[in-house]
Amino acid sequence: MSVRGFLGCLGAVILLSGCTATQPVVWRKAGNLDTTRGVKVAVTAACDIASYHVDYLDNHIRDNVKTVLTGNDEAADAYRLNVTITRYDEGSAFARFMLIGLGQMYLDGTVQISLGEPPIVITEGDFKKNYCVGGIVGGMATMEKDVLPKVGPAIVDAIKKQQTTISDGYSPTVTATRVAPASAGNPNLPADMT
């Protein structure tokens, strides 16, 4: 391959590459889930987003999550999965077409799985979807086609990974640890810190 051909291929890769909204859900708190229970899904928005996008996310997430939480979603012991959209920005297709990184699309939110009445939070986390592909592909990208459909599978993947790590004996649960007070004889600490 000539240098010119190599540089042309490299340029094409650079123009057509970037973030494609495949970022995962990151759990801040992860508990063990009984996959034989059902799940009731509710999607809400804490930002400006079209109601039909909220409805789409609600249905799409429900359909995806039912593949791992397989029980009856109308049962009294069904989980509640609440998704709150905290950031929604469609960006600019023209800017994405012009250069990678410009006109990015953003979809951020929180995911919470709870059980019982009053609800006890079992698992909670965040997702930050970002689409920044440039060139023709970036210019033709839309929130409906390239970002929204990736939320449901990301939640399912996160639940599956969480269940795998818990069943392997490791829990990714973030817990607070209380630090024992310093001894009274430590001369490096003020008197009120001992």
Image: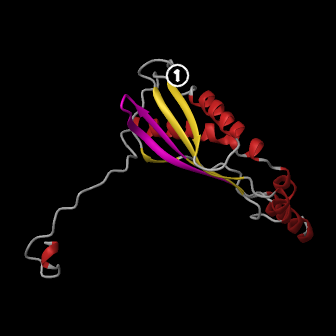
Mark 1 = which residue? 70
46 left or right, relative to 132: left
- Image point (46%, 21%), residue name: 36
Q: Is residue 175 above or below residue 59?
A: below
Is residue 121 in the magenta section? yes
Q: Which quadrant would the N terminus be assigned to in this image?
A: bottom right
Q: Position of residue 160 (x, y in %)?
A: 51, 35
Three-letter residue code for mark 1: Thr
Q: Residue at x 41, y 42 (%)?
A: 30
Q: Determine the residue located farthest toward the bottom in the rendered image.
A: 187
- Residue 18 pos. (x, y %): 73, 58
Q: Quadrant of the C terminus?
A: bottom left
Left or right: 130 as drawn, with respect to 73 = right
**Colour convention:** secondary structure
Question: In this view of the protein, which residue sits in the foreground, 90 or 71?
Answer: 90
Q: What residue is shown at x 71% (from left), y 51% (from top)? A: 20
Structural crowding at the residue carrying mark 1, measured as other residues with C-alpha within 10 Å and reported as few (<14), some (14–19) or many (≥20)? some
Q: Quadrant of residue 5?
A: bottom right
Q: Is residue 192 left or right of residue 69?
A: left
Which residues lie in the magenta part?
A: 110-130
Label 1 element class: loop
Q: Nearer the viewer, residue 6 or 71?
A: 71
Using the image, determine if residue 46 lies above or below residue 68: below
Q: Is 79 covered by the magenta stretch? A: no
Front residue of 14/130: it is: 130
Give the image location of residue 4, x and y in percent. Answer: 92, 70
Residue sitting nearer the eye, 79 or 12: 79
Residue 99 at x, y = what percent?
Answer: 82, 65
Prevailing secondary structure of the magenta residues: strand
